[in-house]
Amino acid sequence: MKRSKNDKILGGVLAGIASALGVSAGLIRVIFLVGFFAIGGITFGISSGAMLMIYLLLWIFLPAE
């Protein structure tokens, strides 16, 4: 899995995940945003703050294409 350099909005992390899974980057972005802004702040068993930290760590540690 690698960060996308061509199809990125912020860091290319979600586009890289979408590419690795073989799905649309838009779908992954929508799932992430719905999960991030879900009522109560907890979705998929993870808080919004944890989701943000995971995203930032992936941005730092995933190599770019």
Image (spheres, rainbow, N blue to C red):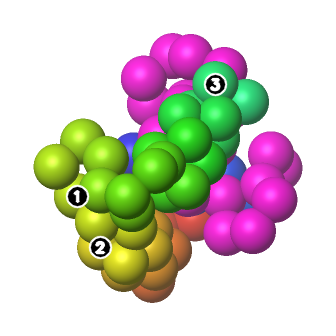
| Mark 3 neighbour class, 10 Å CA radius: few under 14, some 14 to 19, many 20 or more | few
> Closest to the observer: 51 or 7?
51
Residue 2 in percent (x, y) is at 48, 53
Q: Secondary structure at mark 3?
A: helix
Residue type beneath disc 1: Ile
Measured along the vertical axis of the image, is residue 33 above or below residue 40?
above
Q: Are marks 3 and 2 in contact (CB under 8 Å)?
A: no
Q: In this orientation, which residue lies closer to the viewer: 53 or 4?
A: 53
Answer few, some or many: residues within 10 Å of disc 2's Cα (few below 14, many 20 plus, some between 14 and 19). Answer: few
Of label 3 and label 2, which has the lower sequence position? Answer: 3
The residue identified by callout 1 is: 46
| Tag 1 near tag 2, CB within 8 Å | yes
Q: CA separation, marks 3 and 2?
A: 21 Å
Residue 61 lies left or right of residue 34; in this view the side is: left
Whole-percent x and y of residue 33?
60, 48
Disc 2: which residue? 50
Q: Which residues are magenta?
A: 6-25
Q: Please check the rendered image and state whether residue 13 is part of the magenta-colored stretch, yes or no.
A: yes
Per the model, the C-alpha gap separating discs 1 and 3 is: 19 Å
Q: Residues within 10 Å of mark 1 (few under 14, many from 20)?
A: few
- Which residue appears at 48% of the width and 48% of the height? 38
Amino acid type shown at disc 2: Ala
Distance of label 1 from label 2 (alpha carbons): 6 Å
Q: What residue is drawn where x is 16% and y is 49%?
A: 45
View extreme (left): residue: 45
Mark number for residue 27? 3
Observer-side mark, 3 or 2, equals 2
